[in-house]
Amino acid sequence: MRIGTLKESYTADAALFDSRTQKIWLAIASMLLMLFPFVASDYWLYLACLVAIHVASTTGLNILTGYTGLVSLGQAAFMGLGAYTVAILQTRWGTPFALNLLAGGLVAMVGGIIVGIPSLRVKGLYLAIATIAASFIAHFLFANLKITGGTAGISLPPARMLGIDLDTSFRLYWLIVPVTVLMLLAAANLFRTRIGRAFIAIRDRDISAEVLGIPLLRYKLLSFGLSSFYAGVAGGLWAYFFRVVTPESFPLTMSIFFLAAIIVGGMGSILGGILGAVFMTMVPELLKLIVDLLPGGAELTVFLSPVRLIIFGGLIIAFLVFEPLGLAEMWRRVRRFFHLWPFRN
Amino acid sequence: MEQPHISLKRRNLMLGAAAAGVAALTQPLSVLAQGADEIVIGGSIPMTGVFAFAGVGINAGMQDYVKIVNDAGGIKGRKIRYVPEDTGYKVDVSVATFKKLTSQNKINLYYGDSTGFAKTINPELDRNGQILMAGASFASELNDPKKYPNQFLVGPDYTEMFGILLKHIAKEKPGAKVAFVYSDSEFGRDPIEASEAAAKKLGLSVPIKIMTPAGSVDVSTEVIKLRRAAPDYTIFHGYILAPIPEFINQGKQQGMKSKWMGTFWTMDSSTVMKMGEAADGFMGVMPFRYYYDTEKAPMLEKIRAMRPEYQSTAYVQGFLAAMLFLESAKRCLDAGKPLSGPNLKAALNSLKDFDTGGLIGVPITISGNSIPVGRVYQADMKAQKMVAASDWIKL
């Protein structure tokens, strides 16, 4: 039983993990993540990798939209930039995957900074449209440049680590999940620094932030750059995961998917990004499994498939109506409940 | 301070959701009991999304053929089980479906829903070595037995479809001018380059190639360009319906005399009939017979007896896919070979002058990854039917 948390210093208050219980739970979660590949089937491993890639990209968008308040619908395009960079480097020069992923992130970062330039002048919906335009340009380049293989795209060989081909979900898990965890830790730490606080100040009121001496353009571009870096690395992981990159791999709907993930999960919260990505990826799959439990076989699949989509859509609407602060807020409520239990419920 | 607390209703809702989640999670862990002597066909089928019109037909076709074989006692006493799942025509969902179905069943044969999926899953098929796959894609890239050794196309690839149309044109009007109108997508661009060269070889000219966004509506400037080029034939590719009717309507209004043509996904009877009166005479390549075809076809008669209402060409495609799958399995078992990907593919490639029961009008031979046969059909709007405009053309 524990009743609240006691902070005795500013350092304790700003700590990344603020209580012992939290640290224990995180240790348990890490253990479970390590054990998971050994007990899960190929299907669950596949989904775990996909979720991890989505988490990485969603966290990137959360830095930009959730923490800096700049709406973007170009996240999928930046993922595409990262994926193509990795695919080109891997197929042409066979450089090590770590270098490729870093290069993917950096190329996407440059793309993000360029797209972010209008952000000083335009905000909200206007910025969203500017980023959509960027994704059209990216699509055009992917489909028409010679180096990207045109509409047929690029098929790439698997990543290699210590002489082992990472060609199964089990092996890829050990690449994708640690990279995502590292990125999450970096993002969580970011908001304990001067840069992260500047982002939050810009989100809360950009004019006040400027008055306080925060150079808006530099920080907005930095936020775009960081967000795109995350997308680029996620795109690189995506490329190694699917091993085919085509211009149609990163449609606009994918950007909407990430935006929906941070809204459903909770904007401006690292946990929100994680929960949102998990929700958006897993709920359709879980609904599929529930449908599978019903008797009726192939005939029923035809009728129930659209119903599943309707339920998924309904769930998103329900979340937005009943918990506009997202899944992260629900989780905070649950935590608060246990903090005070059994004295208050 | 007043702490917000979880209301009873909300708690119950969360508990309910958690229970449903747990129930769903535990299900796939219990691998379904499977008879050792079953033959299993898995399917990533798009029953929702933009391609649902085809997926529903494909699913019904596969189901029906499996039923016919099972009712006749299966193959060498082995029953067939068909396990489809909806993908919404999304590659990542399709791959998830593949992983799920293969981890729950010992899949021998698999039906994929898109070019993207076929390309993505290919390394896995090669690694796994247990599965022969076909699918809804007719991408020319897949027609490469070296690169895609465990896959095949249930018909001609897109370049071969163009080849069939061009051969027909060269015979009907030597030296004709042929325009290509295609969508800005992998699907649309697929056959264009190779077909331009093929046209030249046949003595035809390609005065204009027009690329539009898939499903675009306003095509007036493109129609003007097309009219200036005055082609004798215009082949549309990479669309299902829009913007084809718009092109035809505006082209006819501007006095164009071109004959209009399409490829497989445009050519279902119901799709062509939706184009309206202006599309009378619309032609295109079809690798299969239509549901209502009157020429002798015992398998079509069986289908008509099972399903009295019109079945789409996607249905016939699914039906034929299942037929070729199970014929390969039968040949493998007859030869006493295990059902592995390479064995199944070799059995498929042993098909020489195989009779499809009239689904394709001529006996077929599959030497590589495709069935390079097709026929040109033409829309008769008065009869609301597609009628044959050529013989079966083999490439």
Image (spheres, coloured by chain):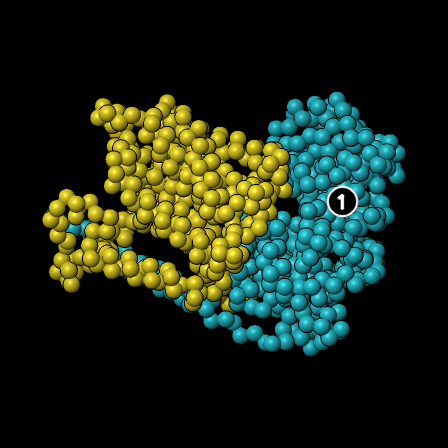
Chain colours: A yellow, B cyan
Check the residue under mark 1 and report the chain it is in: B
Give the x, y percent position of residue B72.
Answer: 71, 73
Screen quadrant of the N terminus of chain A: bottom left
Relative image position of residue B270 (x, y in whole percent): 68, 46
Q: Is residue B86 visible?
A: yes
* Quadrant where the image shows the C terminus of chain A: bottom left
Residue A110 lies in quadrant: top left
Given the image, on which type of amino acid does mark 1 rest? Met
Q: Residue at x 67, y 75 (%)?
A: B78
Q: Residue at x 57, y 50 (%)?
A: A157
**Residue A30 versus residue B54: which sits nearer the camera?**
A30
Label 1 residue SS: helix
Furthest-front residue in this view: A162
Q: What residue is disc 1 on?
A: B161
Q: In the drawing, does residue B314 fall left or right of residue A90?
A: right
Front residue (pair B225, B156): B156
Please give left or right for residue A227 compared with residue A107 in the image.
Answer: left
Instruction: Find residue B362 and report its horizontal and vertical position in percent.
Output: 84, 56
Q: Is residue A313 left or right of residue B196?
A: left
Identified at 78% across, 30% down, the residue is B206
Asked where in the image residue A144 lies, by quadrant, the reply is: top right
Q: Residues within 10 Å of mark 1 (few under 14, many from 20)?
A: many
Q: Position of residue A80 (x, y in %)?
A: 50, 40
Asked if B144 appears above or below A28 in the picture, the reply is above
Q: Is residue B267 visible?
A: no
Task: State the residue in front, A117 or A344.
Answer: A117
Residue found at x 36% / y 51%? A181
